[in-house]
Amino acid sequence: MSENRSICPDWQVGQWFNTPVALSPQQLRGEVVVLHFFQMLCPGCVVHALPQAQRVHRMFGDSGARVVGIHSVFEHLDVMTPAALAAFIHEYKLTFPIGVDQPADSGLVPVTMQRYTLRGTPSLLLIDRQGCIRKHVFGRVDDLDLGFALGHLVAEQKLPAEPAASQPSLMGQSSCEGDSCPIIAPV
């Protein structure tokens, strides 16, 4: 049985930091992407997820995996502004690209966070070279587990002409169907 892999949902980002150009899943196709959704007032994000993202960014640089952060604010909307985020990025010395998720027209959950049906922050998604979500974790991700999963994704061959038939996934189901990639059940 072959897999139908399609591009994951686009990011609806109003502003970017640490990158001269806006980023999208389509632009990053062909690369492994470590996507961190966070809020600057989220204790789990500040204590664990963001330092982990920065370490992965330093370790991989431009070879193997690309780290992207999405600041998705669904609480304390009045204080978590892009200006406050800029100061936060500077103080915490974050150097990977960070986008500001677009607020929703109705409701509190920002647009990109809705598209990926996330439960909250921190949330980490690993996206393979074909643009499919291969791992989705809400909450703390152990460094060794992340390293193991990243190592396997980076080792996979680059964009084959046709997906391999019955290709096993070390991190759960990975096929994408239709116009979006379904989120794999959180680990």
Image: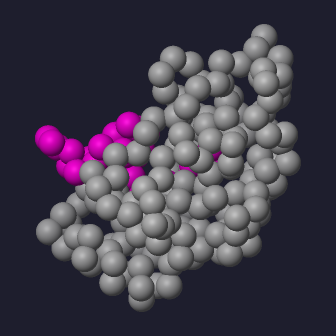
Left or right of residue 148: residue 116: left
Compared with 169, 126 (above or below) is below
- Picture residue at 76% right of the left edge, 62% below the top: 63
Q: Nearer the viewer, residue 35 or 52?
A: 35
Please give the range of residues in magenta: 103-127
Question: Which image quarter holds the N terminus?
Answer: top right
- Picture residue at 45% right of the left edge, 60% below the top: 21
Q: Nearer the viewer, residue 119 or 24?
A: 24
Majority secondary structure in the magenta region: loop
Query: Residue 101, how many percent across, how many down?
Result: 33, 54
Left or right of residue 85: residue 51: right
Question: Which image quarter holds the C terminus?
Answer: top right
Whether the magenta-drawn stretch holds residue 104 is answered as yes
Q: Quadrant of residue 84?
A: bottom left
Image label count? 0
Left or right of residue 105: residue 14: right
Q: Residue furthest bottom?
A: 91
